[in-house]
Amino acid sequence: MDENTKKTIYFFNQLRADNTEILNDFYSEDIKFFDPVGKIETLSQMKAYYKSMYSGVESIRFEFKNIAHSKSIYFFSWDMFLKTPKLNSGDEFVVTGVSEIHFNEESLAFFHRDYFDLGEMVYERLPGVGWVIKKVKNRLKH
């Protein structure tokens, strides 16, 4: 396992709302980040994003399933195990996704895009709304 892979696994599993300083050792100052929620263009925005996203999270961990890379471009497929009182009645749930991360010569990430189903993560887990979305999905299957 190479250093960028080790660093990424550590970063994903150690980051919390109260330790965003670890981002200094992972992202470049001019990080470009994209996910289904939004777009980030600086390290300070990235810190604020994670601080906000992780506030209220009781537990979060990532299990990496597949890792592929060519030179400095990496793809990580993962399962995120998340527990927060904001979603799924506070019970832990799993979201599957893929991260594409590009590292510069200093082994800092300057591009990061997360691919995951926002509906699976959020909308299906909200009281009332989740029931409706599951009904619609079931209808589309038939």
Image (tube, grey):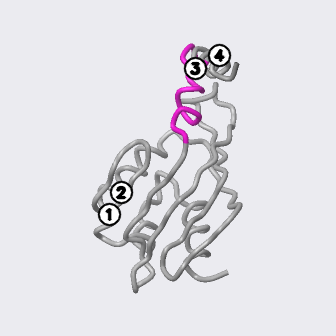
Q: Which residue is mark 1?
A: 43
Q: Which residue is mark 3?
A: 133
Q: In the rendered structure, does residue 122 fall within the stretch colored magenta?
A: yes
Which residue type does callout 1 highlight? Leu
Identify the image quadrant of residue 138.
top right
Residue projecting furthest to the front: 142
Q: Earlier in the sequence, mark 1 or mark 3?
A: 1
Which residue type does callout 3 highlight? Ile
Q: Earlier in the sequence, mark 4 or mark 1?
A: 1
**How many neighbours does mark 2 have within 10 angstroms: few (below 14), some (14-19), or many (20 or more)?**
many
Residue 64, image x, y percentages: 68, 61
Q: Are marks 3 and 4 in contact (CB under 8 Å)?
A: no
Q: Which residue is mark 4?
A: 139
Which residue type does callout 2 highlight? Met
Q: Are marks 1 and 2 in contact (CB under 8 Å)?
A: yes
- Region in magenta: 117-130
Provide the major secondary structure of the magenta segment.
helix
Instruction: Kindly identify the residue that appears in the image at 48 percent across and 79 percent down.
Output: 72
Residue 28, image x, y percentages: 35, 72
Which residue type does callout 4 highlight? Arg
